[in-house]
Image (cartoon, grey):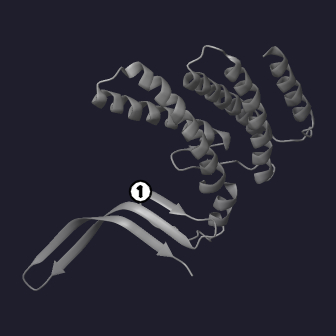
Amino acid sequence: MTKLLKASAIICCLLFLTIPQEASSQTIKLLAGNTLNGAVTGVSLGGAVMGLQNSDDFAPARVGVGAGTLFGIGVGFYDVSQVAKGEQFYISGTFNDGTNTSIIVLLDTFYGAAAGAIVASSITLIANKPIVDALQYGSSAGAWVGFGFGLVDAFALSKGPGDYTVSATGNSGNQADGLLSYSNKSNNLGIGLVNPSLTSVTNLNQTDFSKRTAFNLELVNLSLNF
């Protein structure tokens, strides 16, 4: 473990030394934040492997720290390449937003672990089985499922700096209204789910004046642009 951590530290130092002296603080924040998030994600997945194997051997956690750190460094340079110098980085994922890409992966991994634990414990309660093992295996498997979804979420489903730049210039794409909304990269398809609204109707005649307000709820809102 010590050798792997030393190698990761050396790589980090070499990569940070390649940053120009005039680089903005935003660049440093992106690299440092992604590196830290990657390390935490890696050790979490290492712990998940230990849980699935029902083992107290810390080798998976050791490998996870090293691999996660390298993953975070790579994502950090990816984020830096997505924004102009001094520009603020912002990304919006399916379940959460963040100021770097790796936080989307990390949080989705945690969400997966929590969801796996809930589902597994619910099944064991119905089957009247011991709940401790269900929490162990459910959260471990859920962490890997969440990590896989997090990669898709962060690099395919999310909206990054380029998307918001397009919106700021007046081309907002084909966004459908809804509490949950999705639009593809080509901006020709928009899907919105659960869109509440209020409609006010005023009736005026010679003898009466009335105003009626109604609550509307659109379950699905589909927008297509050909």
Residue drawn 65% across the image and 42% down it: 99
According to the image, label 1 marks what residue?
179
Measuring from the top left, give residue 134's x and y in whole percent.
Answer: 42, 25
**Where does the N terminus fall, quadrant-wise?**
top right
As drawn, is 161 to the left or to the right of 93? right
Q: Which of the two residues, 226 or 119, is positioned nearer the viewer here? A: 119
Residue 124, quarter of picture: top left
**Where does the C terminus fall, quadrant-wise?**
bottom right
Furthest-bottom residue in this view = 206
Measuring from the top left, give residue 188's x and y in whole percent.
Answer: 57, 74
Marks counted in the figure total 1
Q: Is mark 1 on a helix, strand or loop?
A: loop
Measuring from the top left, give residue 119's x and y in whole percent.
Answer: 39, 35
Q: Which of the two residues, 54 or 181, is positioned nearer the viewer here? A: 54
Measuring from the top left, give residue 20's x and y in whole percent.
Answer: 92, 40
Residue drawn 70% across the image and 28% down it: 39
As drawn, is 158 to the left or to the right of 190? right
Q: Which amino acid does label 1 sit on?
A: Leu
As drawn, 202 above or below 135: below
Disc 1 residue crowd, few under 14, some 14–19, many 20+, Cα 10 Å:
few
As drawn, is 22 to the left or to the right of 30? right
Residue drawn 17% across the image and 79% down it: 203
Whether residue 17 is visible: yes
As drawn, 15 above or below 4: below
Furthest-left residue in this view = 207
